[in-house]
Image (cartoon, helix red, strand yellow):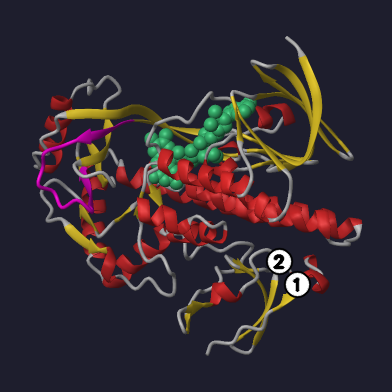
Amino acid sequence: MTTRPAEKTDLLVVGAGPTGLAAACDALRHGLSVRVVERRPSRAEHSKALVLHARTLEVLEVMGCAEALVAAGQRFRALHVRTATDATPVRVDLEQRRWGDTKYPFWLSLPQYETERILERRLEALGGAIDWGTELTSLVDGPGGVAVTLSSERGLQTHHARWVLGCDGGRSLTRDLLGIALPREELDLTFALADVHTRCALVEDEGHVVMTADGVLLIVPMPERGLWRLIAQVPRDAALDDPAAWNALVLERAGLDLGVHRLGWSSRFTLTSGVAARFRKGNVFLLGDAAHVHSPVGGQGLNTGVQDAHNLVWKLALHRRAALDEAAREALLESYEQERRPTALAMVGTTATATRLLTLRSPVARWLRSRAAWLALRLPFVQDRLARGVGMLDLLTDGQPRLPNPELGGGARLHDRVHALLPTALRWQGQELLVRPDRVLARPHLFPADVAVAARGEPS
Ligand SMILES: Cc1cc2nc3c(=O)[nH]c(=O)nc-3n(C[C@H](O)[C@H](O)[C@H](O)COP(=O)(O)OP(=O)(O)OC[C@H]3O[C@@H](n4cnc5c(N)ncnc54)[C@H](O)[C@@H]3O)c2cc1C
């Protein structure tokens, strides 16, 4: 192997999944120099994460890519929930929910490769690029930054970065090199999934959840006509490797003949979840699946990773630029773990509980769940909470709510008045707040007034 000359950037982003790409776009927007390395030779064509939520789209709007994502995706119009084989399905009309003030009052279906492609295009427009086929192999952290060894077919290279962002997924080498544990809880449940091409007459933009004694089945619309994501809890040895087997499973559990005639991507997974013991060590940070792994049934993993990136990058930019004393700088960087780890713990806990409820084994518990869910889901306020809650709009960060985004007249919204890069001092309904586009900041003392933009937003 040859050794190539060293390079230097503010950030080294390890991994070009959705988290790494979002972090890199945000960093370039803030004027930081960035290198993105990705072990794979090219983009994976797996559809994986299929749902983008309102809160994530708000964050991605700040990064300049929400419009392209919304144009490429498919909005869920409704969700049909059948709480038992013999129960009447409850239709949750997602368009009629009280979403509140968000500009994105929907769940958006978009395959992960498409989300990544749009993020990559944005990265390139901002002047960045992905170093495909380049792998982090070791790192040494010191007071002035991190020396990293990268390996590619061109040889080994040392790269110096002020900070390293480990966005390298659930099996993160960055995490291992830091010696940070990620204790996992395994649920003894097997799921199979497949993207299936169908000839069915199902309404294209409506999803289905069917709870049966054999296990739960999810039918999720995808943007391409006739293509659906099926996710089914199955026995460990279930053979589901051809279209006919999937068609039979859906017919048996949901009474629907989908006319499955071709399988696209298919996979099988057991449920595992956990949160890393720390999200930062020195100048190295963990984000996305490197920091927390979730049950895919909750559909929150990609969304949480993108929000991690948005939480961290502006703090690094502020640290780099502003004349802060050492204690303030340290507090700024520490706030990433202080804010994101509790959010990840809550998210992992909620998705694990939801998964357990969906996969109950005892017939009595299933009967109780079915009755309770059927009664509750018919209530409009429960449907509203489901829509907003899954959309992550009610998530607190550091005890603080998301910054509302009401229309202010003339087509403008409150988020448009918030500075895109810096904390903004906002007088809102008689209160003085320090805000970011996605939330109210809990600890204004961390962000000295001379770096806040005094944009006093009053609704017109
Ligand atoms: C079947 C399935 C369905 C899902 N559905 C949803 C959903 O509906 N909604 C949702 O929000 N989430 C969902 N998820 C979860 C979602 O896919 C993940 O949370 C998401 O991919 C995490 O993004 P990431 O960028 O953090 O990590 P990853 O996407 O895993 O990306 C990490 C990248 O780092 C690279 N890498 C690893 N090691 C190195 C190294 N040493 N050097 C350089 N590069 C490296 C990898 O090649 C990879 O490209 C689903 C997951 C699965 C499997």
Locate residue 367, reporting x and y percent.
21, 49
Residue 391 placement (x, y as % from top left): 42, 59
Q: Identify the residue at image location x=32%, y=67%.
A: 382
Prevailing secondary structure of the magenta residues? strand
Cα separation, mark 1 vs mark 2, equals: 6 Å
State whether label 1 is within 8 Å of ligand 1.
no
Residue at left offset 90%, top offset 56%: 326
Which of the numbered marks, if any, corresponds to residue 452?
1
Q: Is residue 198 magenta?
A: yes
Q: Are marks 1 and 2 in contact (CB under 8 Å)?
A: yes
Which residue position is annotated with label 2?
A: 422
- Residue drawn at x 50%, y 55% is 65
Instruction: Count neighbours of disc 1 (C-alpha within 10 A) and say few if under 14, some if 14 to 19, many if 20 or more.
Output: some
State yes or no: residue 363 in magenta: no
Vertical placement of residue 397 versus 285, above or below: below
**Can residue 184 be seen in the rendering of this structure?**
no
**Which residue is drawn at the image coordinates 20% and 55% (left, top)?**
80
> In the rendered structure, which amino acid carries the disc numbered 1?
Ala
